[in-house]
């Protein structure tokens, strides 16, 4: 056991999935091999690992990843914080560093656009410890419980900056008039008063102390933490102009020439104006979440003891019976107990035609009951509803960072110190080389205020916020910035067959009996399949029920992924599944070969039925292609993606479907087991392709995980947000093209934002250093740069990815 260091950290790490002492030993061994771990002891009974590590060499994230590689999971809690006082990308890095230094924190991501932090940490990490860490870094923080709190923070931020701007404007406008009077040679009593140095001092001081106070506070906090941010630049630049003018007024004999009170005051006022506009614009980037939240009705009508009473929707619990009248939004996810009505599910499906609902049907919270009264038993409430999952997915996506942000982060780490250096060299150059320290001061102030790390900090998060929010409104749920960027770069799409290219509602169309009659073959098959959840099994059982067949009891049921099922029926072993699997099980298919070939040539899925190791019949099932499948394939190919079909069906069946929807026969791979689909994805990636995989999230799990981007296609009431990187809530395959289009549009905006942020600083700083920019103009440009980045991102709100995808598919 390694010797304990003074700065070692003790962690209590929960480990999920251990079943025995061997599991504990496996995790213990994996942790001890991790560099930086000094000691590890795992208890299988309590499912807890006690780890001592050197925080300089190992982290909670590394520990969690090592446990995951060993085959187990470390459950992490998520804490959201509202952070106040951040002004630029340097602030983001400072807050993230402070949060990651808290023992037990695995990840910390700070979003400048929303002024929030998303922290993933070990259970038991106190939110107050996170708040204290942020406060020690010089910023305000408090835990967030709901998105409404973010909106309250945003409204307060706008109000604060508006008050600062109005305070500055009241005192700065007279100084502006004095400056204009001097420039244009205006004369008169008013200009004489406004040009008086003592009057200008009286006007500038409230602005310097009142409006400038927030920059002094934030600058002091940053410097105390041995870092620098935008507030340091603003505070230093305006203070230099103010103090220089004060010296010129009080001690003119020291050589200072000219008064620049109006420069300091106007700079602070313009920056306050820019911050007000920026806060308003940033608020508009989160309209998507607000729109989703507004779908939740505030109150619900609950039936208790035979009486209906109105309660807050947040007070409804699972199992409550809710009464929904015509025209009302359904407050919970649930099952209809009584009543018949049509429900508008356009929230999820995008279809404006209401869906008929009756007893036993599922309904989703946030959808609208068109007519008739529905009595619904709540099965999910609050954050557990489909709508709650969508909101949570969008919030987490907006809190994430795409890889392209790394460049801006690296630049922001050195940006402010570099600007301070350029400003110092500017002043010294004008003083020592030109002999004009006054112009040197003015140029240095212009350098300090023209530099804008804000635009760099906002370039990516504002675009990601608008993009993911627009996606949520369009039924395209992207799990994070990394998935968004990866989707934009895709050049290959691999599609599953059943439930993806087809409607996922197969039906039995023919039974070929090789021994006995058709009814006997179907009875054997349905009995074996009755416990399976596979769509083909459901179709077989439904066909047997439609023919009125009574099914015998079964036992020893086993489902073989990518193969079929085996079960004991009336004492005999029955296997039902893919012909290739049956052959692998040792069953001769010679007698069934002509039938199998005929079914597969017709594009049908052939399923063999074997009893006691003998093939007794073949079932033919048909699953119609989705109506939009061919258009979806065309849209993807016109986007430059190579479309592949990977199916567990026989090759003849898969090729027949590929011909129907327009997929190149050379890109059809069948039959493939789940592991072989994953191998195909890995092979394509090994060729340098960027691969998206589309599947049902069950048998296709390995392939989805192997792809650069995994897509899950879900029906409206069966949203599995965690199944893939991108979830298509609407059951329309053209959503794949829509998601790629949205991702490309978002990435294009990010590049534009970063380009203009870099160009602005690259051109602006030299111009200011050479005295070509008045400090007031420089301040205005700086104030508007971050606003322009945010407004550019907001253009994405007008983009309709579905309309673009439909045009490509036509």
Image (tube, grey):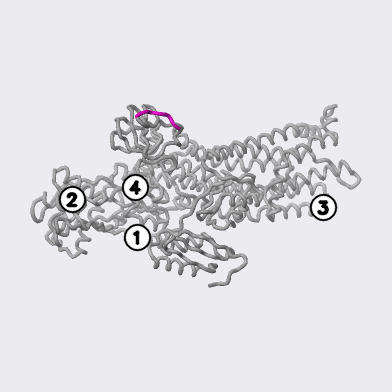
Pointer 1 local density, CA inside 10 Å: few below 14, some 14–19, many at least 20 = some
> Between disc 2 and disc 3, whose residue precedes?
3
- Where disc 3 sits, the SS reads helix
Separation of marks 4 and 2 at Cα, in angstroms: 35 Å
Determine whether the residue tagged by mark 2 lies in a helix, strand or loop.
helix
Query: Could you tell me how far apart the alpha carbons at marks 4 and 3 are, in whole angstroms?
Result: 67 Å
Task: Give the image location of residue 686, x and y in percent.
Answer: 40, 63
Earlier-in-chain disc, 1 versus 4? 4
Q: CA distance from mark 1 to mark 4?
A: 19 Å
Q: Left or right: where does residue 391 sit relative to residue 273? A: left
| Location of mark 3 (residue) | 431
Labels 1 & 4 near each other (Cβ < 8 A): no
Q: Earlier in the sequence, mark 3 or mark 1?
A: 3
Query: Could you tell me how far apart the alpha carbons at marks 1 and 2 are, in whole angstroms?
Result: 33 Å
**How would you rate the neighbour count of disc 2 (Cα within 10 Å): few for under 14, some for 14-19, many for 20 or more?**
many
Q: Report which residue position mark 2 lands on.
A: 526
Choose between 681 and 550: the one closer to the eye: 550
Q: In the rendered view, tell whether residue 1 sits above or below residue 610.
A: below
Q: Secondary structure at mark 4?
A: helix
Question: For the stretch drawn in magenta, what is the main secondary structure?
Answer: strand
User: Is disc 1 placed on a helix, strand or loop?
Assistant: helix
The answer to whether 675 is drawn above or below residue 717 in the figure is below
Q: Which mark is residue 680?
A: 1
In reply to whether residue 126 is colored magenta, the answer given is no
Residue 92 rendering spot, x and y as whole percentages = 60, 50
Q: Position of residue 458 (x, y in %)?
A: 58, 46
**Horizontal arrangement in the rendering, residue 604 relative to residue 40 (left or right):** left
What span is colored magenta in the figure?
Answer: 306-311
Q: Nearer the viewer, residue 136 or 116?
A: 136
Disc sitting over residue 693 in the figure: none
Q: Which residue is mark 4?
A: 633
In the image, 222: left or right of 647? right
């Amino acid at each position: 056991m390694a010797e304990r260091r003074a700065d070692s950290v003790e962690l209590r790490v929960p480990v999920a999935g251990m079943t025995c002492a061997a599991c504990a030993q496996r995790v213990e061994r994996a942790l001890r091999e991790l560099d930086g771990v000094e000691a590890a002891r795992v208890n299988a009974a309590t499912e807890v690992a006690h780890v001592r590590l050197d925080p300089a060499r190992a982290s909670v994230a590394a520990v969690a990843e090592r446990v995951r590689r060993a085959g187990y999971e470390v459950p992490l809690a998520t804490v959201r914080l509202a952070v106040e006082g951040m002004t630029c990308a340097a602030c983001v890095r400072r807050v993230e560093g402070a949060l990651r230094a808290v023992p037990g924190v695995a990840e910390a991501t700070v979003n400048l656009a929303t002024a929030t932090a998303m922290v993933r940490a070990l259970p038991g990490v106190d939110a107050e410890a996170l708040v204290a860490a942020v406060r020690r870094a010089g910023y305000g923080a408090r835990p967030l419980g709901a998105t409404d709190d973010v909106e309250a923070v945003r409204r307060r931020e706008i109000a604060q900056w508006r008050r600062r701007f109005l305070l500055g404007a009241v005192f700065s406008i007279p100084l502006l008039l004095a400056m204009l009077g001097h420039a244009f040679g205006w004369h008169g009593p008013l200009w004489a008063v406004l040009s008086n140095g003592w009057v200008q001092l009286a006007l500038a001081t409230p602005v310097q102390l009142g409006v400038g106070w927030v920059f002094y506070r934030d600058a002091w906090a940053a410097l105390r933490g041995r870092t620098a941010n935008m507030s340091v630049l603003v505070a230093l630049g305006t203070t230099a102009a103010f103090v220089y003018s004060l010296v010129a007024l009080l001690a003119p004999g020291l050589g200072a020439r000219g008064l620049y009170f109006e420069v300091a005051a106007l700079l602070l006022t313009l920056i306050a104006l820019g911050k007000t506009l920026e806060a308003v614009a940033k608020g508009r980037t989160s309209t998507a979440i607000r729109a989703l939240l507004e779908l939740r009705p505030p109150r619900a009508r609950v039936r208790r003891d035979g009486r209906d009473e109105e309660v807050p929707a947040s007070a409804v619990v699972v199992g409550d019976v809710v009464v929904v009248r015509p025209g009302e939004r359904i407050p919970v996810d649930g099952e209809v107990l009584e009543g018949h009505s049509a429900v508008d599910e356009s929230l999820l499906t995008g279809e404006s035609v209401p869906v008929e609902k009756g007893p036993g049907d599922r309904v989703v919270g946030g959808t609208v009951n068109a007519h008739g009264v529905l009595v619904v038993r709540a099965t999910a409430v609050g954050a557990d509803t489909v709508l709650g999952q969508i909101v949570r997915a969008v919030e987490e996506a907006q809190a994430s960072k795409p890889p392209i942000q790394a460049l801006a982060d690296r630049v922001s780490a050195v940006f402010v110190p570099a600007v301070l250096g350029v400003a110092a060299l500017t002043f010294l150059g004008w003083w020592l080389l030109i002999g004009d320290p006054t112009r040197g001061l003015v140029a240095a102030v212009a350098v300090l205020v023209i530099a804008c790390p804000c635009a760099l900090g906002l370039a990516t998060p504002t675009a990601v916020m608008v993009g993911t929010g627009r996606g949520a409104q369009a039924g395209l749920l992207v799990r994070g910035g990394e998935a968004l960027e990866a989707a934009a770069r895709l050049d290959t799409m691999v599609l599953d067959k059943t439930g993806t290219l087809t409607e996922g509602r197969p039906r039995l169309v023919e039974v070929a009996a090789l021994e006995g009659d058709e009814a006997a073959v179907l009875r054997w098959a349905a009995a074996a399949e009755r416990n399976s959840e596979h769509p083909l099994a459901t179709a077989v059982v439904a066909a047997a029920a439609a023919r009125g067949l009574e099914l015998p009891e079964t036992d020893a049921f086993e489902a073989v992924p990518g193969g079929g099922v085996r079960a004991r029926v009336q004492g005999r072993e029955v296997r039902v599944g893919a012909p290739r699997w049956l052959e692998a099980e040792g069953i001769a298919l010679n007698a069934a070969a002509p039938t199998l070939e005929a079914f597969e040539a017709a594009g049908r899925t052939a399923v063999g039925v074997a009893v006691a190791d003998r093939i007794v019949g073949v079932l033919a099932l048909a699953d119609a292609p989705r109506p939009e499948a061919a258009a979806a394939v065309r849209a993807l190919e016109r986007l430059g993606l190579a479309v592949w079909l990977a199916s567990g069906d026989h090759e003849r069946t898969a090729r027949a479907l590929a011909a129907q929807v327009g997929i190149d026969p050379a890109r059809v791979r069948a039959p493939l087991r789940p592991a072989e689909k994953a191998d195909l994805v890995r092979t394509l990636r090994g060729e340098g392709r960027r691969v998206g995989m589309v599947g049902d999230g069950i048998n296709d799990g390995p392939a989805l995980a192997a792809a650069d981007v995994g897509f899950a296609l879900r029906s409206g009431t069966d949203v599995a947000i965690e199944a893939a990187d991108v979830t298509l809530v609407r059951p329309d395959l053209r959503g794949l093209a829509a998601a790629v289009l949205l991702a490309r549009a978002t990435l294009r905006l990010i590049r534009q934002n970063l380009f203009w942020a870099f160009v602005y600083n690259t051109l602006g700083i030299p111009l200011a250093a050479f005295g070509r920019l008045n400090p007031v103009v420089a301040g205005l440009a700086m104030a508007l740069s971050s606003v322009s980045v945010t407004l550019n991102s907001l253009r994405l709100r007008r983009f309709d990815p579905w309309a673009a995808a439909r045009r490509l598919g036509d």
